[in-house]
Amino acid sequence: MKTTLALSWRLLRGGGRRGMLGTWLTFGAVAISTALLLFAVSANFAFDARADRGAWRNPVAAQTGAVAIEAQRNDFVRDRQITVIDLAALTPEKAAAGVAPAGEAPAGVAPAGVVPAPPGLPRFPAPGEVWLSPELAALAKELPADQLAGRYPKVAGQIGDEGLVHPGELVAVIGHRPDAAAMTAPRSDDWIVGSPPTKIASFAGTASEEAEAYQVLALIATVLMIVPLLVFGGAAARLTVARRDQRLASLRLIGATPGQVAAMTVAEAVIVAFAGALTGAILYGVAVPLLSRIQIGGGVWYLSDLWPSPLVLAATLVAVPLLVGLSAVAGLRRVVVSPLGVAKRETPPGLRFFRVLALIAVLAAVPMLSRSTSVSVIAAVIGLAFLCINLVGPWVVALIGRITAGSARRPARLLAGRRLVDDPRSAWRTVSGVALTGFVAGFLGLLSPSAFSSDPGPAQLRVAVLSGSAQDAVTQAKERLSKAGVQATVKAEKKVVVAALGSTADAAVIDRARTALDGLTPGRTPTTEADDQRFGMQMLADVGAGTVVVLSVSFLVAIASSGITAASSVLDRRQTYALLRLAGTPLSVLDQARRAETLIPLTVMGGGAIAVGAFCAMPFMLGSVSVNGLITLAVCVGLGFGGVIGAGALSRPLLRAVTADPAPRPD
């Protein structure tokens, strides 16, 4: 083993300038893959961390030993959401007397002195006290008191980071007596209210529906990003594969055993891959401050959310070199079984049709996703579709090559067709990144983002009256608005007080009216139609932002993959190119052939991958295809083709260099 490792190191170092260029290409591919892989994986842990920090606001009812009552509602200011947590401590006497939200039975007597402090607060808030998040406290000082601060008159302090979902979140924690109206009045069950008054034994809650929705979206986005990354990372092991196979075949012919060949291959691949993975981890660490500025779910990120844990980092640094090593060994079959055929550059046997059958089987399962409630099943099927596209790609490229060669009328097209037939796997590696990105674009670009109205009409604040007379509430609302200097038409629509502010009301007027009507109905918030749609609009906006992030990552991988594999392909075929130049083939013809063997399969496979992505998105479509989705898809197609053409152009000087001396080289 020591001799094998020493020989591998000597061969790696002694590959010459162009051999080292291939090694650097592999190093760069692994570094990019690792950095983006860490981002894709860390995003899931980041959403989990957010869900954990916000779980205390989604209380779990106490079976016994209740110590407090907790409720949540949402308020608004300047078109931003404020999460309001109402808390009341249960003393033993109150608990024994049965003071609890309407319709709930007493949960038992709480021992004295065991009421816990909410996350981010040094103690449990006393009745009348208000604790604000730093961003909300700053906003309350910035705006006039009648627009925001008047809603929270007795501020006792600020909430720490452990009680906030993200930096800049607007949160208010308000203390009450357990018999206060805000803690006993009935509340309707909708997202504006959040959660009704609930007796709790601790602040160990569960993830909210909103947090769970983001976790699902993060998992799907991870699958859409991670599969191309794994494919790219595996392809990195096959860069300059022809040169390495020739070298290993020569070693086999002079007596090297299959085990020695495999060991040398793994050692060479793992050494380069580990160095690349370590560099990729450093690159991700440098990029974390920039990535933390991406706004998802209403705000940016804490650095600790996106920083991978030591276990994740260690697993990545082990898994990436292992994947590259396994990919390198997987291509050794011809070297081990038929080294003479490799040395003679015989055309490898054709690919099997079972690759197409695997893709058909996965696509047949897609229509059933609409009946599935399991996120894992959905993510698994999408991931399998991804992998099957990668599996079927070389088979389709070989078929395209036969058609291209058979219909060729020019030398460049004939050369391109023959190259596709001779080495479809190499040709697929050049276009696979953009083809898989086409799948992502087809999946995300056709999902309709137009489920909500964009024109809420004139400003109207609405407050539900869940008990008492609606007319009495209208009278109180008129008095409050008049005192605040807000002109509005107030009326009752069934059990809802409607205050029409007119079409000329600006944000300041609306916030002044919100403050005036605050507490009109205990536990209820004055809201506009835009407020009622805010959760859905925020989700759609975040889906749009997530789409941009996923497509950006996919395009980065695709363009990097195209550029690296195009350069590697030139190095692999330098002897072939040199012999063709020696035979009199113009350099322009070689360049045209090289472009054709990229653009022809890219057109076919890119279009096919987009169609497969759109087909996989059909179970999740909310309605008709939106114009924005089609524009996104068109932009993706344009950028994909432009990126591949640009990446291919970068390797043109390398082609000129390897054909400058047409004399055959001994290697």
Image: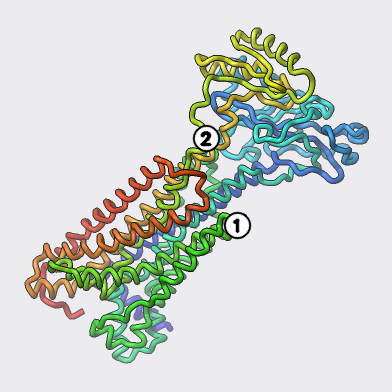
Near mark 2 (Cα within 10 A), the count class, few <14, some 14-19 or many ≥20, is: few
Where 34 sits versus 67, above or below? Answer: below
- For the point 73% across and 45% down, the residue is 204
Q: Position of residue 503 (x, y in %)?
A: 51, 16
Q: Nearer the viewer, residue 83 or 537?
A: 537
Q: Residue drawn at (18%, 80%), measured in percent from left and top?
A: 666
Percent across and percent down for residue 30 are 39, 62
Q: Quadrant of residue 560?
A: bottom left
Q: Say few, some or many: other residues with alpha carbon within 10 Å of mark 1 (under 14 / 14 to 19 / 20 or more).
A: few
Q: Quadrant of residue 90?
A: top right
Viewer-nearest residue: 398 or 314: 398
Snapshot quadrant of residue 566: bottom left
The N terminus lies in quadrant: bottom left
Disc marking residue 372: 1
- Indicate the colouring scheme: rainbow
| Three-letter amino acid code of the residue under disc 1 | Ser
What residue is rendered at 24% in x and 82% in y?
A: 345
211, 295: nearer the viewer: 211
Question: Which residue appears farthest toward the bottom when viewing the image?
Answer: 255
Position above or below: 533 against 11? above
Instruction: State the residue lying farthest toward the left.
Output: 584
Local SS, label 2: loop
- Residue 289 image offset from top left, x and y in percent: 46, 43
Q: Tell me the residue that label 2 is attached to.
A: 452
110 with respect to 376 (left or right): right
Q: Is residue 171 above or below residue 155?
A: below
From the viewer's perspective, is 559 left or right of 506? left
Q: Is residue 396 left or right of residue 459?
A: left
Labels 2 and 1: the sequence-earlier one: 1
